[in-house]
Amino acid sequence: MTLIHFDFMNILILNGPNLNLLGRREPHIYGHRSFDDYLPELQADFPDLTLTSFQSNHEGVLLDRLHAAAGWGETGSEGASQGVVLNAGGFTHTSVALGDAVAAVAGAGLPVLEVHLSNLAGREDFRHVSYIGKHCVGSIAGFGLESYRLALHYLLRQRPRPVGFGRR
């Protein structure tokens, strides 16, 4: 398969429930910085990527945004991304619907990387199950906010093709 390369890539960073509380919620696990404080650093370090960040505490809203990243939303291919960095938070361990959505967009060629701030293997047993991980190109966990940077490095090196263009 031939990949189409672009000078710029649109990457969606999709954050799930409680990630709006980074820096305040359990800082001994999740750190002292908010994602909003960290995002400009990522943007400066990855000038060839157009980073869009979106966070919601609501499962259906995350599903809609993931569909839009594949070009399946109301805006069609205008909302399409060439990759998704997904921190589904607690939905990782509970949401069959989110797992199905990741499977659908990944099946259409949109690479999704699962990221987590903490090392899930060292946490409670229920956190050892991911309904989204098997549909992702990979999972990065345990590096705090740097997990996002590692995911972006992967996407930048892969330069995946865009999806959603001309699809119905």
Image (tube, helix red, strand yellow):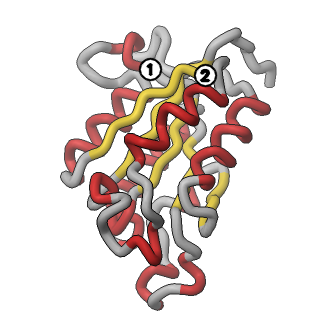
Q: Nearer the viewer, residue 85 or 24?
A: 24
> Could you tell me which residue is drawn at 78 percent across and 32 percent down?
157
**Residue 88 vertical position relative to residue 152 in the rendered view, above or below:** below
All told, the count of numbered labels is 2
Image mark for residue 166:
none
Disc 1 and disc 2: Cα gap in Å? Answer: 14 Å
> Could you tell me which residue is drawn at 43 percent across and 28 percent down?
52
Residue wearing tag 2? 49
Q: Position of residue 53 (x, y in %)?
A: 40, 34
Residue wearing tag 1? 80
Residue type, numbered disc 1:
Ala
**Among the two numbered marks 1 and 2 on one chain, the one whose residue lies closer to the N terminus:** 2
- The quarter of the rendered structure image containing the C terminus is top left
Residue type, numbered disc 2:
Leu
Q: Position of residue 25 (x, y in %)?
A: 31, 69
**Residue 125 vertical position relative to residue 52 in the rendered view, above or below:** below
